[in-house]
Image (spheres, grey):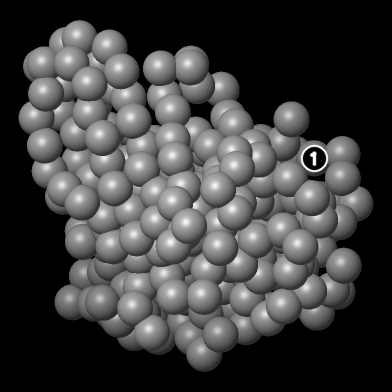
Amino acid sequence: ETGVTQSPTHLIKTRGQQVTLRCSSQSGHNTVSWYQQALGQGPQFIFQYYREEENGRGNFPPRFSGLQFPNYSSELNVNALELDDSALYLCASSLGTGEWWAPGANVLTFGAGSRLTVL
Amino acid sequence: AQTVTQSQPEMSVQEAETVTLSCTYDTSESDYYLFWYKQPPSRQMILVIRQEAYKQQNATENRFSVNFQKAAKSFSLKISDSQLGDAAMYFCAYRSLGIQGAQKLVFGQGTRLTINP
């Protein structure tokens, strides 16, 4: 069984640009969530997608948006980049709502993240 | 809103010794999940152990065990026989039991654990 893979691993952008980060979920998982981890901090929940629909969002502005595809992979898009967007972006997959009773349903499997630097 | 607090930014322990990492949380919910995740320099968040709040028995996973005190809203992690590979950032996390809606994790600030040979 493959784990969660993210791309790119590192990237550098300038203020005002747009960025797209990608995530392939673990086999058998139908839910993807994204987290932002600033340096020295714990991850902060951005949003979650379940069966291609956003079903939860944290305290992030609309310029943070996402997609989930039929194969359950996902993208995180950030428009109008700001310096404070510099962070590690973590993707996590899980067996989502509707199958909450299944073994492992409440366990998130994380990828290694994409390190974004905004100059 | 739920909050998670880890009051120890850094901890160190001698190899083969035992160390305990602290975590407290605040919630008005009666049922929820608690987790400890490990984040090594490779950056990938790895699940160490989890606890369902409705279970009174403390979870254990080999050398890792928790002391779950529901009334005190405390959830500490004990690592026995510490090994060099245990060196990492450790995050305590909370998740509501909600059947519907996002499986949102609320993380603490983390504790950096150093293992001294």
The vertical placement of A112 against B117, above or below, is above
Image quadrant where residue B55 sits: bottom right
Q: For the C terminus of chain A, which image quadrant?
A: top left
The residue that appears at 36% across and 37% down in the rendered structure is A76
Q: Position of residue B72 (x, y in %)?
A: 81, 50
The vertical placement of A52 against B76, above or below, is above
Residue A119 showing in the rendered view = yes
Q: Nearer the viewer, residue B91 or A108?
A: A108
Name the secondary structure under disc 1.
loop
Image quadrant where residue A51 sits: bottom right
Residue A43 showing in the rendered view = no
Image quadrant where residue A18 sits: top left
Residue, far front: A70
Q: Nearer the viewer, residue B2 or A48?
A: A48
The residue that appears at 11% across and 23% down in the rendered structure is A13
Q: Position of residue B48 (x, y in %)?
A: 49, 72
Dot 1: chain letter: B
Q: Which residue is under mark 1?
A: B27
Q: Position of residue B29 (x, y in %)?
A: 87, 45
The image shows a total of numbered marks equal to 1
The residue that appears at 50% across and 53% down in the rendered structure is A32
- Left or right of A83 in this view: B18: right
Label 1 is placed on what type of residue?
Thr
Badge 1 crowding class, 10 Å Cα cut-off, few under 14, some 14 to 19, many 20 or more, is some
- Left or right of A17 in this view: B10: right
The residue that appears at 36% across and 43% down in the rendered structure is A75
Q: For the N terminus of chain A, which image quadrant?
A: bottom left
Q: Nearer the viewer, residue A99 or B76?
A: A99
